[in-house]
Image: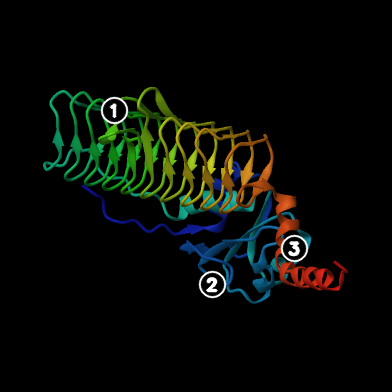
Amino acid sequence: MWPPPRQKVIAVCTLIKVLQTGDAGLRWSQAGLDPWLEGAASLDQASTAQLSFLEKGNALTAVLGASGVGALLLPDQQDLIDLASQRGIAFAVFADPRLAFAEALDQLHPRRRPLAEIHPSAVIDERAVVGPGTAVGPRVCIGEGSRVGADCILHPGVVIYDDVVVGDGCELHANAVLHPGSRLGRGCVVNSNAVVGSEGFGFVPTAKGWRKMPQTGQVVLEDAVEVGCGTTIDRPSVGETRIGAGTKIDNLVQIGHGVTTGRGCAFASQVGIAGGAHIGQGVILAGQVGVANRAVVGDRAIASSKSGIHGEVAPGEVVSGYPAIPNRLWLRCSAAFSKLPEMAKTLRELKRDTPQ
């Protein structure tokens, strides 16, 4: 089912011509001896057959003088350009060298795509539909009434329950699970052991104990959403949990029932978002951020690592700490923490010396 691995060797001039058509904004280039490139590495580890890149202010700038790198993608920074020229290193100057590096990696390491066929061990309900060009791997299960679009890749062990819709060009990695009613737009990626549409955590307390609240809603992933390994996105009792187009979700993230997010958000590992929270457009939540039930986070807000959001964060605001407060205030508070023992000692001395 899988084609043999491919290794691509590419000349610098050829690579630059390809990158010129990309989105990184090529300014100009100097190919030098036009070396052949076999891969890429960080600047401090790169060899003469490898590509690397630098951004303004990058800590690795100091090692450029001794690096054995074969070619560089640089920002428009004259000291870096001069040093690369002096050392005879092939380079290209980009408005966004990091983006150029991402585009270059696509060329140096082209993706292997499995053949568009259905493995004999796959179990597909007779009322399910699999689109043309889709590759279905070993032990994949597709339930009744589910529809998988064209040109998708379903890796081994994927489970798609009944009444699921997977848009064109999606990729579901090994052991990903899509529960009933889940809806995936075009170009979504669900990584290994992620679960989309699992039951929300809903129980009603009674005299006899906890009574389960049926979770009859669904999860909707809009176009180009990516879900990391081990992440869970719960469906609600009614209505939907919706993840906005282009949102990127890291590994081990928990998104509760009824959450809605805007387009283009980014959630780092171990973020937890409780039920009913509303996340705006382009929001960034760093690692281990917690968002409380029904909290509201405005468009383009940023929460730094381990922040705890309980209420509302204004659009564009940067917050830190638990409970989350404006980042600048949190920095001042953090600076004062180390002084607390000394301040407490001074306060005790003042109290002792003050007549009662």
Examine the rendered structure and indicate whether residue 116 appears above or below residue 104: above
Q: Contact, CB < 8 Å: mark 3 with mark 1?
A: no
Can you give x and y, in whole percent of width and height, for residue 300 in the image? 64, 37
Determine the residue positioned at 29% across, 44% down: 176
Gap in Å between the C-alphas at discs 2 and 3?
40 Å
Secondary structure at numbered mark 2: loop
Residue 164 x %, y %: 28, 28
Q: Residue beneath label 3, please?
A: 336
- Horizontal and vertical percent for residue 29? 67, 54
The residue drawn where x is 85% and y is 66% is 356
Q: Separation of disc 3 and disc 1 at Cα?
A: 49 Å
Mark 1: which amino acid? Pro
Q: Please report whichever mark, 3 or 1, sits nearer to the chain's N-terminal start.
A: 1
Q: Is residue 169 left or right of residue 318?
A: left
Disc 1 marks which residue?
A: 214
**SS at badge 1:** loop
Residue type pointed to by label 3: Ala
Q: Is residue 350 left or right of residue 19?
A: right
> Against 19, is 125 above or below?
above
**Residue of label 2:** 45
Query: For the residue carrying disc 3, how many other residues have a C-alpha within 10 Å: few (<14), some (14-19), or many (20+)?
Result: few
Name which quarter of the figure residue 7 lies in: bottom left
